[in-house]
Amino acid sequence: MKRITGFTLMEVLIALMIFATISVLAYRAVGAMTDSEFRLSQEAAHWRLLEQFFTRFEADARQALPRPMMDGNRKLPAWQTTNDGRGRLSLQFARAATRLPAAVGTQQGQRIAYEWRDGHINIQYWPAFDNVPSAVPQTYRLLDDVTLFHVDYLTQSDSWVENWSSSDEAALPRAMRVRIAMRNSAIVERIFALQ
């Protein structure tokens, strides 16, 4: 009589059970890797946005001019900070001209402002250095979900102050310390030398 070789039903069931267990483990591992990749791409996008903001902010601050601005008949300082202490900060200054379209600046330069309000940081462009009181700036959103935007200024006597509008100081601060935090994020601090 010929002997039939092969697997018994029990051996086949055990092999299927082992294969199913390995498949479930592999599926979970691939799912965890996909989730990790998604979180990493979100984190990278977050840091990329912050870096773009700081790059733009530094470029504008380094082009600041020690020139007062006019708003109708009212003279504004070359650098003005307004902080109401309730989540609203505005920083206005005169900036040298860049290669921007004529709609957002003149060839001599322009007045710009960074404004933090309602969890957003916006940039505002006025048509020129000196504007009529009814001049409306163009506003563009730069960052969302901002929980902290704080600016300190380095005086000529090497001390840090929160507001820069003192008439006995130079028109521009020596340096700026900028702190930003976004939702679910650490505080990021940068120092920019201006003089």
Image (tube, grey):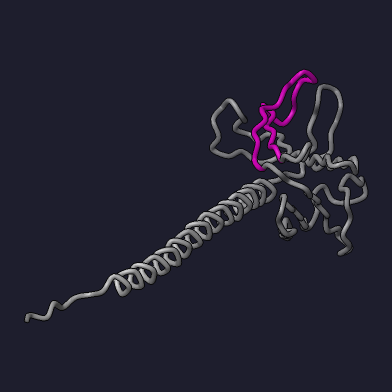
Q: Quadrant of the C terminus?
A: bottom right
Q: Is residue 53 above or below residue 76?
A: below
| Vertical arrangement, residue 19 with respect to residue 148, above or below | below
Decide which of 149, 20 is in the foreground and name it: 20
Residue furthest top in the image:
134
Front-most of residues 94 and 8: 8
Any part of residue 93 in sight: no
Give residue 135's quadrant in the image.
top right
Number of marks: 0
Q: Is residue 138 magenta?
A: yes
**The one of 51 and 43 positioned closer to us in this rendering:** 43
Q: Magenta span has 170?
A: no
Placement of 110 over or under 135, stated as above or below? below
Please provide percent x and percent y for residue 192. 71, 58
Question: Seen in the image, is 69 located left or right of residue 86?
Answer: left
Residue 175 falls in image quadrant: bottom right
Q: Which residues are magenta?
A: 121-143
Percent coordinates x, y for residue 62 in the rendering: 67, 51
**Along the line of sight, which residue is nearer the eye, 80 or 24?**
24
Quadrant in which the N terminus is drawn: bottom left
- The image position of residue 136, as x and y in percent, is 72, 22
Residue 35 visible in the current orientation: yes
Q: Hey, which residue is sitting farthest left in the picture?
A: 1
